[in-house]
Image (tube, helix red, strand yellow):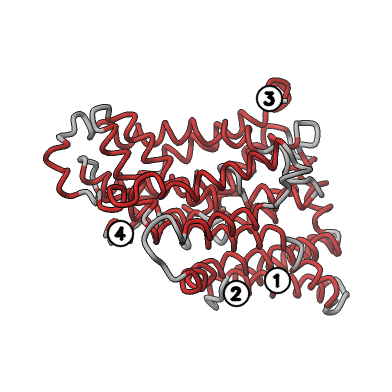
Amino acid sequence: MSQELIIFLGMIIVFTFSCFKLKLPVSIAMVLSAVTGTLISGNGIPVRHLVEGMFGYIDTILVIATAMIFMKTIQEIGTLNALSASILKKFHSTPWVLLIFLMIVSMFPGMITGSSTAAVLTAGSIVAPILMLVGIPIVETATIIAIGGILGMIAPPVNVPAMIIGGGIDMPYVGFTIPLLLLTIPVAIFTVLYLGLKYVKKINYDEIKSKINLEDIERYGWKLYLPIILGVVLMVLGKVMPTIFNLGMPLIFLISALVGLFCGKKVNFIAVSKEAIKETLPVLGILMGVGMFIQVMTLTGVRGFIVVNSLSLPPAMIYVAMAITIPLFGAVSSFGAASVLGVPFLMVFLAQNQIITASSISFIAGLGDLMPPTALAGIFAAQVVGLKDYSLVLKKSIVPALVIIVYSILFIVFSKEIASIIY
C-alpha cells in the first residue's frame, strides 16, 4: 500500500469519525483530517501551510459574507415577500408560468450567497406558503424549495463548489455564467413543472387574495426592487467596463444593501448584518477547512495520487464513479465533495473544456445537500413547511437528482461542442 493512499485513508477516516461519531462541525473535522495528513506524512504540524490553506478561499468568504448581508437586508425590508406576491397576482391565470417564476424566486438567495440553506430559509419560507396556497401538497412543496435551493447554489453569479474546484487547479472563476445558466435553468423548469403543475390546474385568485400579504408592495412600490436592480446593473457594468466599474462583488453587495435601507421597511442594519454573519459562519468555517484540506492533499502528494489512479479507470467507469462518489461524499459537505473529489475528477477530464466540466461537476456536488445524514436542503425545507419526516422529501427528489446527474454528464461528454457555441 502506497504512502499516499495511507495518508488519504487516514484523512478520510478521521474526517468521517469526527463528523459522524464525535458530531463535530464539518469545518473542525476538515482541520483535524488535514492535521492527520501532515502527521502521517511526517511533516509534523506545518502551521504555514495550514494558515495558507485556511486563507485560500478568502475571496469567496468575503463574497458569501457580504451577499448574506445583502440577502438579509432585502428580506427584512420586504422585497422578497413583495416579489412573490406580485408574481402570484400577475401570473395566477397561467399556472405554469407562475410556478417557473416562483422557482426562480426560491433560487435567488442561493444565486447570491452560494448557499442552499440560505435560499431555503429565506425565499423558501416565503414561496412555500404560496405554493401550498395554490394547491401543491406539502411534500411536493418542500421538495421544490429544497431543489430550488440547490439549483440556486449552483446558478451564477456565486457558485462556491465551482470556485473551489477552479481554485484547486488555479483556474479563475471567469466565464462560468452561461454554462451554469444552461445547466440550472432547464432543470429548474423541469423540476417545478414535474412536481407541481399537475396540482395547479386553475387558480381562483379572488379566493386566495385575502391570504396574500400585498401591504409592502402597495406601500413602497417599485422602490423595493431597487437594491436588486442596482446590484445587477453594477455586476453587468463590471463585466462590460471592467476598467471603470471594477468594484468587486463584496463591495457591490454592500452598496446594494445600504441602498436597500432607504427603499422599504426600516431595519437596523447593524443587527441585520450580525444576524447574517451568524447564519453564514458555518459555511465560512467549512471553506477555511476545505482550504486546509486541499493544501495538505497537495503538500503530501495525495491529490496527484488520486488523479493518476482515476486516469487508469475505463472512461465509462469514471463517469459512474463520479455520479456515485461525489453526491455520497457530499452528505458531509457539498463543498468538501467539490474539493476532495471534484478537483481530481476535473484533472481527469483535462481533455474536455475545463469551464464547462467544472460547472457540471459542481452541479453533481450540489446534490450533497440532499444526502443524509446531514441533508441540509432537505431537512430545512421540511422544517419550513412543517413536515416532520424529511425522508419524504428525499424520495420525491430522486427523479430531479437523476436528471441533474445525467444532464451534467452529458454536458461533460459534449463540453467541447457546447464551448464552441458559447465562446
In the picture, the quarter occupied by the C terminus is: top right
Q: 10 Å neighbourhood of mark 4: few (<14), some, or many (≥20)? A: few
Disc on the earlier residue, 3 or 1: 1
Q: What SS does tag 3 mark? A: helix
- The residue that appears at 61% across and 66% down in the rendered structure is 284
Can you give x and y, in whole percent of width and height, for residue 168 in the image?
A: 77, 52
Q: 10 Å neighbourhood of mark 1: few (<14), some, or many (≥20)? A: many
- The residue that appears at 26% across and 50% down in the rendered structure is 129
Disc on the earlier residue, 2 or 3: 2
Disc on the earlier residue, 4 or 2: 2
Looking at this view, is 211 or 191 the one in front? 211
Q: Mark 2 and 1 residues: CB-CB less than 8 Å, in contact?
A: yes
Q: Which residue is mark 4?
A: 389
Q: What SS does tag 1 mark? A: helix
**Residue 160 in the image: above or below residue 193:** below
Q: Mark 3 and 4 residues: CB-CB less than 8 Å, in contact?
A: no
Q: Is residue 276 visible?
A: yes
Tell me which amino acid carries mark 2.
Ser
Disc assigned to residue 422: 3
Question: Does residue 247 appear to the left or right of 127 in the view shown?
Answer: right
Q: Mark 3 and 1 residues: CB-CB less than 8 Å, in contact?
A: no
Q: Which residue is mark 1?
A: 33
Looking at this view, is 288 or 302 the one in front? 288
Question: Does residue 1 appear to the left or right of 254 in the view shown?
Answer: right
Q: 10 Å neighbourhood of mark 2: few (<14), some, or many (≥20)? A: some
Tell me which amino acid carries mark 3.
Ile
Q: Which residue is mark 2?
A: 18
**Residue 189 in the image: above or below residue 159:** above
Can you give x and y, in whole percent of width and height, for residue 37 in the image?
A: 78, 70
Can you give x and y, in whole percent of width and height, for residue 285 in the image?
A: 62, 69
| Discs 3/1, front | 3
